[in-house]
Image (tube, coloured by chain):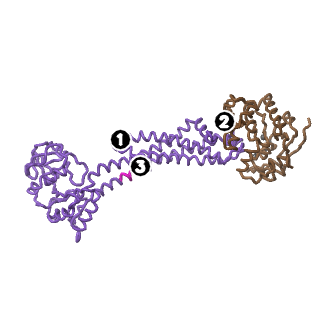
Amino acid sequence: MTDEVVHLENISKIYPLVSGDVLALDNISLSIKTGEFVAIIGPSGSGKSTLLNQLGCLDVPTSGDLKIDGRSITQMSDYELTHLRLISIGFIFQKFNLLPLLSAYENVEYPYTLKYRKRDSSGRVSKLLAMVGINEELAKHKPSELSGGQQQRVAIARSLVNNPKILLCDEPTGNLDSKTGHLVMNMLKKLNSRGKTLIIVTHDPGIAALADRIITIRDGQIVSDVGNVS
Amino acid sequence: MKDIIFAMAVRNVRINILRSILAAIGITIGIISIASMGMLGTNMTASVTDSLSSMADKLTVNPYSGKGGGGGGGPPGMGSESDNLTKKQFKDIEKIVGKYGFVYGVHNIRAKVKKGSDEWNTQVYGLEVSAMRTILDNLTAGGYPSSDNSVLIGTRFASDNDLELGSRFSVGGNGVKVSGIIESRGMTMDLNTDSAIVMTKDKYESLFGAKDEFGQANIVLNDINDAETVTNAIESQMNRREENVRVQDSSRMVSMISSSVTTITSFASLIASISLLVAAVSIFNIMMMSVTERIREIGVLRSIGTQKKEILRMFVYEATLIGIIGAILGMVFSLVMGYFFILIMVGSVKYFFTYESLIHLPYAMAVGLVICIFSGLYPAWRGAQMDPIEALRAE
Ligand SMILES: Nc1ncnc2c1ncn2[C@@H]1O[C@H](COP(=O)(O)OP(=O)(O)O)[C@@H](O)[C@H]1O
Ligand SMILES: [Mg+2]
């Protein structure tokens, strides 16, 4: 029980629309252990992103119970959810989503400053940037001056700065060429091998093949959940 | 740049500097308008009070004939006996005023004047020469009458009728000679000499009668603060049974004029503040634009752990920065434009650099800034309330 970092019980998500309710997640139950590498696959519109948003505390389910690191989030206030996103979750997006007003260095430092109310003097930001292969010169640049691969590497460094329990990635290589995609995946895989829980939404079978476990979703339901021994 | 939220607000203003300045100019114009109006009011009041205070220490006493005649200072009709103060009344007034100031009697009448073949009516005053020396101490030319056949005339009377020192003309059928010309005294209550003739008391009485019975008694107070005491004393002693005299206090008129100047300029300030309303709309607009453009950024900020109130703070900072730019520009331009505006409108900047005048600058700046922040509040709130998932999806 203690090493269960994510626990979902009968989770449903309904989007009420005038044209009729959309059942985006249909009674999903699921547990993910610390250090697991899970790939979520499924056709477009099946509910992968919706599921990831619930895991990332960006949204709360319509019904069911969702525990992150042992704490139920379904009754949490917006303030608490936001704080949980800051300290426990690292996001990596398909479109990188760096802050355009800040330099690469400042982008990585931003969540740290929010959490500790001060600038980083421990060298953590520089260390993370070096780890993802962004040198000091590049770190001074604004995101618009970086290539896609460089931006995604900065985004990985940013997601790690507050040492989160879980890394959530929605199509992290979707906007990258295959070579850069590979580089980014290797980086993520290495983080996982050092103990970080990694949950990746993808439709790329090559990426899914890297995971320990593959969950397939269709019409908001889990249709298969298998270990990957290959 | 310790506060990253503030730093982002600064950078966004800098990146959109042209737009920010354009929005700020609205606030600048608003600040210029209300600061200039405020300063104009203060400077105008100060300079009006200044020019009126010379007449503020004067009281006039007129006989009350029951005929209405109101308005005091003006000339009474062709001298019927009842229109004059009696000898006793004048003595009483002198006694009451006593140590408070100086009293002199004024004869006045509109009389026929003839020069060559021209004939017209004009205001004629009869005064003791000693009173002339004290009250009309500003002759542009000549001297005081040394004989009863010499008169003083006002500058306007002189220029209108081509008269100069030594010129001769006739008043009430009697020839006189100009011995001196009185400098313009402007708006006064006691003696309006600019278009008048001033002759000696004896000459006046020999021409128009009314021996020792003046049409008006003028009082020059030593201390302006005694105006009320003296007015009350005269009224309580002389009007005990029936209304015999009317006392006019010119300080009351001065304060009335000052207060209407204040009213007018306050009204102008009110109108000027409409321009601030326009500025508020443009700030609102710019801030809405800034929020809308940055929806996706808000989504990112929120998803990586930025609280709603921090988003709110970021946009309020932005509005505040625009406000500060506007306020600083407003202060500089208010100083420069206000200075010339007042120089033109009031004719003097003697009071421009006084506390009462310059206080309008920080006041207008504060109003502009507050309006700017208020206009930014709703857009900021809208930004903060944005759903992170929706915001992330925005293009
Ligand atoms: N905010 C929303 N409002 C209404 N319907 C939504 C919303 N978000 C997602 N959906 C619907 O929920 C379903 C699952 O969407 P999503 O999780 O984005 O799928 P995926 O990521 O697998 O492509 C889709 O049918 C989508 O149209
Ligand atoms: Mg998706």
Query: Residue B263 in magenta?
Result: yes
Q: Are marks 1 and 3 on the same chain?
A: yes
Q: CA distance from mark 3 to mark 2?
A: 46 Å
Majority SS type along the magenta span: helix
Observer-nearest of B162 and B339: B339
Q: Quadrant of the N terminus of chain B?
A: top right
Q: Please, what is the three-letter code of the amino acid marked with disc 3?
A: Ala
Q: CA distance from mark 2 to mark 1?
A: 50 Å
On the image, numbered disc 1 is attached to which residue? B343
Q: CA distance from mark 1 to mark 3?
A: 18 Å
Q: Quadrant of the C terminus of chain B?
A: top right
Question: Label 3's element?
Answer: helix
Residue ID at (45%, 43%): B32
Residue ID at (62%, 48%): B381
Residue ID at (89%, 43%): A225
On the image, numbered disc 2 is attached to which residue? A100
Question: Label 1's element?
Answer: helix
Q: As drawn, which residue projects farthest toward the bottom?
A: B241
Query: Residue B193 in magenta?
Result: no
**Percent position (x, y) of residue A54?**
78, 47
Q: Which chain is brown?
A: A
Q: Does residue A95 appear anywhere in the picture? A: no
Observer-nearest of B243 and A198: A198
On the image, numbered disc 3 is attached to which residue? B268
Quarter location, residue B8: top right
